[in-house]
Amino acid sequence: MRIDVLTIFPGILGEPLRESLLGRAIEQGVVDVRLHDIRAFATDRHHQVDDEAYGGGPGMVMKPEPVFAAVESLGEGERRTILLSPAGRRLDQDLVRELAAERWLVLVCGRYEGVDERVVKGLPAEEVSIGDYVLSGGEVPALVVVEAVTRLLPGVIGREESHQQDSFGHDGLLDHPHYTRPAEFRGMSVPEILLSGDHAAIERWRRDAALEKTRSNRPDLLEP
Ligand code: JD8
């Protein structure tokens, strides 16, 4: 899969993309992530990417021309263009699966008060939000999309990191609690059953514990 990320702060994404699972996926060529500096597509003397809001008020708005020029520099082809925005469709694992089925994604990161609305209408771009809290720009949301999508690509997750049983897998439950050595830590013991070697009993315990954790922490996930 190819993912192009358009931003005025490519540095925010550079290092995180080189680390861990994501770094390995990129190195193996499973995903081809390309960062583009929107400022390089501003044609005026000062490479201005923002301007005052029509209608007045505080704060600046990202200009449409450099964003369009950056997107158009990518060439043609079947792709989904996404603008990260607090006004967007909320990202969940269903949307992540949908995006992971695409061949090519273009992620546009705004800053300031946001991007000129003609970017949505004209590119066109779908708006996606990673959640109901306020961030300063679309870069961290874009990184979230890249990581969530990349994990689902064939060959990225091995036996070690199996996602068949992950939280928000197809069963829609939170994950069961996990324990590792030591068997007792600061007076807290690992549940006996996990030390028993009885794999069927362990499976039942994990299923119950996942259900209980979901009831307790996220009852909304159990509603029909
Ligand atoms: C893009 C500018 C900041 C947004 C005024 C200053 C996503 N879940 C999310 N929360 N926040 C964002 C996000 C915030 C952004 C931009 C994404 C571009 N800002 C603006 C409007 C209110 N602040 C996001 N995805």
Image (cartoon, rainbow, N blue to C red):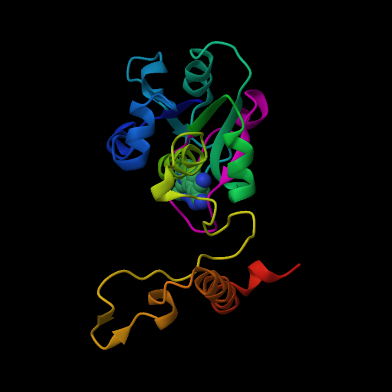
Residue 224 vs residue 66: left or right?
right
> Could one spot residue 187 in this view of the protein?
yes
Q: In the displayed structure, would residue 87 be above or below residue 211?
A: above
Residue 57 visible here: no
- 85 shown above or below 167: above
Q: Residue at x 46, y 34 (%)?
A: 155
Q: Residue furthest right?
A: 224
Residue shown at 50% from the left, 16% from the top: 69
| 178 is higher (above) or lower (below) than 105 | below
Task: Report the side of 23 relative to 175 (left or right).
Answer: left
Q: Position of residue 206 (x, y in %)?
A: 52, 71
Give residue 154's position: percent from left, percent from top. Answer: 51, 34
Report x, y in % for residue 35. 38, 25
The structure residue drawn at horizontal position 54% and vertical position 65%, both measured from the top left corner, is: 174
Residue at 49% x, 58% y is 133
Q: What range is drawn magenta here?
A: 109-137
- Indicate whether residue 115 is drawn in magenta: yes
